[in-house]
Image (cartoon, rainbow, N blue to C red):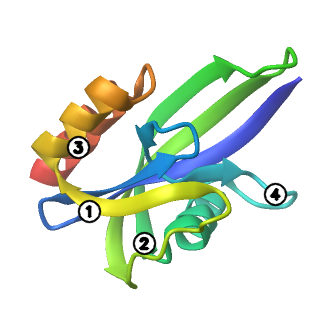
Amino acid sequence: MTEQSAGGIVVRGDEVLMIRDRYGRWTFPKGHIEQGETPKEAAVREVLEETGVQAVPGERLGQVGYALSGGNDKQVTWFFMTYENGEVRPLQSEIAEARWLGFDQAQEQVQRHGYPGYRALLRKAREIHSR
């Protein structure tokens, strides 16, 4: 069975919103797509729930798939998002930390302490932001 999730790479000026998950990895806010929800709607909701930040979704960045323990797979659809408002307040039950990082620092964290495939997503988000 493949679980479907969606998330966003949120940009504010020259900064990216990142979270450190409960496994100590630096990543971006994401979560399950609920019944009747589009991936884009789920991404907006999950960013708000996990970080307290309201963001406007833009173009689709791509998908990342991986295996979960127990034999299931997860497919995550990622969107470029721009900051709208809100203070960063991490959802303590799910994530250890949330903060704004410059693009270079974010790329370093993803490379050193992130998940496979996320460097390419961040590069694409930076390209979109630079347009």
Which mark is first along the chain, 2 or 3?
A: 2
Within-10-Å neighbours for mark 1: few <14, some 14–19, many 20+:
some
The three-letter code of the residue at mark 1 reads Trp
The label on residue 106 is 3
The label on residue 55 is 2
Q: Are marks 4 and 1 in contact (CB under 8 Å)?
A: no
Which mark is first along the chain, 1 or 2?
A: 2
The three-letter code of the residue at mark 4 reads Glu
Distance of label 2 from label 1 (alpha carbons): 14 Å
Which mark is first along the chain, 4 or 3?
A: 4
State the residue at coordinates (49%, 43%).
Answer: 78
Distance of label 3 from label 2 (alpha carbons): 18 Å
Question: Residue 34 at what x, y percent from top left?
Answer: 81, 57
Is residue 131 shown to the viewer in this render? no
Nearer-the-camera pick, 36 or 64: 64
Q: Is residue 48 above or below residue 4?
A: below
Distance of label 3 from label 4 (alpha carbons): 29 Å
* SS at mark 2 in the image: strand
